[in-house]
Image (cartoon, rainbow, N blue to C red):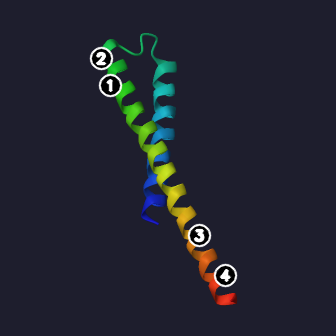
Amino acid sequence: MLLKNVFIFVGVALALFAVAVSIVGLRKEDFPSRKALIGISAVALLLVVGTAFFAVELSIEEAKEREEHNGIAIGEEA
């Protein structure tokens, strides 16, 4: 359950970050400066990698839970 919450939090943060960068980029003609580009790229990379990592971890955890649940159901029927 904790992985799901972290995944949702990081995913929402990534979406909000993308919207914020888009809004600022549309309003400023000289956006981004050299330093801003490096910072924005670093934050975006962290958010994308974090979202992907927690998505994979969550899928592994859910697969294990499904296997455990199916194993119990089969054992009870026998």
Q: Earlier in the sequence, mark 4 or mark 2?
A: 2
Q: Which residue is mark 2?
A: 35
For disc 4, the neighbor class at 10 Å (few under 14, some 14 to 19, many from 20) is few
Q: Nearer the viewer, mark 3 or mark 2?
A: 3
Query: In the image, residue 69 lies at what x, y percent?
Result: 60, 76
Q: CA distance from mark 4 to mark 2?
A: 59 Å
- Contact (Cβ within 8 Å) of mark 2 with mark 1: yes
| Badge 2 amino acid | Lys
Dot 2 falls on a residue whose secondary structure is helix
Q: Earlier in the sequence, mark 1 or mark 3?
A: 1
For disc 3, the neighbor class at 10 Å (few under 14, some 14 to 19, many from 20) is few
Q: Which residue is mark 1?
A: 39
User: How many numbered markers are drawn?
Assistant: 4
Q: Which mark is residue 67?
A: 3
Q: In the image shown, does 25 or 39 lie closer to the viewer? A: 39
Q: CA distance from mark 1 to mark 3?
A: 42 Å
- Say if 16 sits above or below 75 in the image: above
